[in-house]
Amino acid sequence: MALALYRRYRPDTFEGVIGQDQVTVPLMRALDEGRLTHAYLFSGPRGCGKTSSARILARCVNCAKGPTSHPCGECESCKDLATGGPGSIDVVEIDAASHNGVDDARELRERAGFAPARDRYKIFILDEAHMVTQQGFNALLKIVEEPPEHVMFIFATTEPDKVIGTIRSRTHHYPFRLVPQEVMGPYLETICEKESIKPEPGVLKLAMRAGGGSMRDTLSVLDQLMVGSVEGVITHDAAVALLGFTPEALIGEAIDAVIDHNGEALYGVIQKVVVGGFDPRRFVEDLLARVRDLLVLTLAGDRAESVLSDTAEAEDMDDLHRQAKALGLSALTAIADIINTTLGAMTGAISPRMRLELLAARLLAGSENGFVAPAAAPALGAPAPATGAVASAAPATGGAAGGFAGASRGGFAGASQGGFSGASRNRSQSQPQTPANAPAANAGGWNAAGTLNPAGSAGQTGAAGQAAPAQQAMPAAAAPAALAASVTNATAPSSDSRSTDEKWNAAVAALPQAIREYVTRDKVPTVAFGPNRKGLPCLSMTFDKPLSQHAFALAVDNSGKKAAIVVMDAVRQEFGADAVIAPAAVAANGERVESVKRLSPEQLAKVKQQIAMAKAGLAASSLGAGLGMHSGSEPKAQKPAAEGNAEDADGSHRASGV
């Protein structure tokens, strides 16, 4: 009978233990310096080398030339404790799962009283130590606390918290960890060379994925794959079929079906999963892993490719980027929630195929609705949308293929510089506006009533309160995307014919000089006015660079009042008593802006220093450099602008409850 792979390659020295330097290095140093203790606790996940390290430690301690970190391998003790050796009479391995009571502890105490027959120490290795009962631990407590000079204890467990505290406090605790693929991969390649096995590209990644970071489990999987190799070659298809993973092509096909709103293609994928004999739960797990990779790419871009899942590298990265761009952050987050909910409900499911079909229905329904709540039904008496509504409205700037609502990063704010900061993803979520106070769209855009203004028309209500005649009605589901694409400067009440820029100039002119200098046209080149997510009228301010926005967030007037509050008071004089302000998430120079509240103390101190230097005329050419916020970088997760809180992500006020 062939010896299992994990047994043939069990290490005999600490140098042979893979990926556990946090344990092996201190132990080797303690052995060389003669600073051993009488009790050790090795903890960690299964198959990470706890028991093997305990045997190696016993071998190092009882070596004829030791204690040493490099056992000679020639003395009787080293030979007995080597891989395949008969074992030593002075090294006792006890399975605590079946010897966990008071009687077993009493027997161990009696055996510990006798001197070793041959070696330097009598060593007791208690495997699965967490299985010992509390009474058994209490019976061992005295001898573990004050053992004879010739006795050493090594406890190995996957659950150190179940070892009572009085025992743990008398041991040196060394935690073992799962082995990362960067360390395990080269080791598996070495084993394959020794075994004259040639795995196809991606096979070792599948084996490591199935092993879950456990060295023993991974070697067991690799051993099974080697047995089924054909002429010394492990094929990728055979590995996928044996381990039950879903082919990447099926996962990609499912994502593309969601992007294209193609129900036939998505249910075709489910049919392939069922007929092909793939595990439905594993398919959902793999689908969730793909969505996770797309989220990482959306948030961090190309620099995140190194942290993608182990199967992502086998897929064409261009396809991953295409799918991430087509869906966008909002849709991907909603998809992840739907899949995760389904995955939790599949535990013990009687009909997993039905769960897959219901998952497909939810994903298709979400893609049709833009992965947002469905629009509310119109009020009784409200005119029905005109037939012949525009079916091919232009998608939102940066939106997903197929018109996913909120598919662009940051919604309206991330679509372009100066866009609505945190505007509503779906107008059905905000409060309905009456024709008297609804802001009208620019010429050629969708107005507040959900109709399309003719190109070249003013798109505003007249003085008598009559709305401009609508050319075509727009479906409620298409309103947010079309509004985001066309609206750039929404106006306030119809009685005021001034543009947004004219009102903003008037508000700036009314500010005291100490505050005005922070919001001049060179500091705030672009403003936009429109509803936020709560339906409040919001003035979005796009600063020229992040440092200008930080200076505004930190500024106060002569009375100690924050600049943001002073500016909002002036804005309300021009735009209405309910108006709020919010800075855009992207500066005019293209850099992402980090909130001053989320800057580290070191970064905040540097910002304040740069602001002082700028006021003194000593600033460098690029005052935003050095903060880790270069163009193209992604900020930390921050609240979307204009959420309606008392303060926004950069200190600008909105006044909640208005």
Image (tube, rainbow, N blue to C red):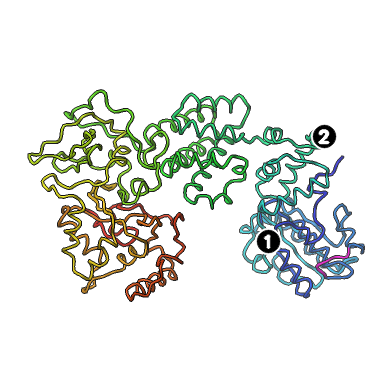
Magenta highlight: main SS: loop
Q: Looking at the picture, how far across and down is residue 360, in whole percent?
A: 47, 30
Which mark identifies residue 231?
Answer: 2
Q: Is residue 176 left or right of residue 610?
A: right
Q: Looking at the picture, how far across and down is residue 413, in whole percent?
A: 34, 49
Question: Which of 532 and 399 lies nearest the eye of the viewer?
Answer: 399
Q: What whole-number distance in Å separates the C-alpha atoms at marks 1 and 2?
A: 53 Å
Q: Looking at the picture, how far across and down is residue 24, in whole percent?
A: 73, 64
Mark 1 residue type: Phe
Residue neighbourhood size for the residue with mark 1, other residues' Cα within 10 Å, grouped as few (<14), some (14–19), many (≥20)? many
**Residue 202 falls within the magenta-colored stretch:** no
Q: Is residue 502 left or right of residue 356?
A: left
Which mark identifies residue 400?
Answer: none
- Marks 1 and 2, the one that precedes in the sequence: 1
> Does the residue at mark 1 contact the one at mark 2 (Cβ under 8 Å)?
no
In this view, 655 is above or below 29: above
SS category of the residue bearing label 1: helix
Residue neighbourhood size for the residue with mark 2, other residues' Cα within 10 Å, grouped as few (<14), some (14–19), many (≥20)? few
Question: Which of 42 and 19 lies nearest the eye of the viewer?
Answer: 19
In this view, 462 is above or below 7: above
Mark 2 residue type: Glu
> Based on the displayed image, in which of its 4 quarters is residue 50 positioned?
bottom right
* Magenta range: 68-72
The residue at 36%/61% (across/down) is: 545
Q: Looking at the picture, how far across and down is residue 196, in whole percent?
A: 83, 43
In this view, 335 is above or below 123: above
Question: Which of 191 and 78 lies nearest the eye of the viewer?
Answer: 191
Which mark identifies residue 137?
Answer: 1
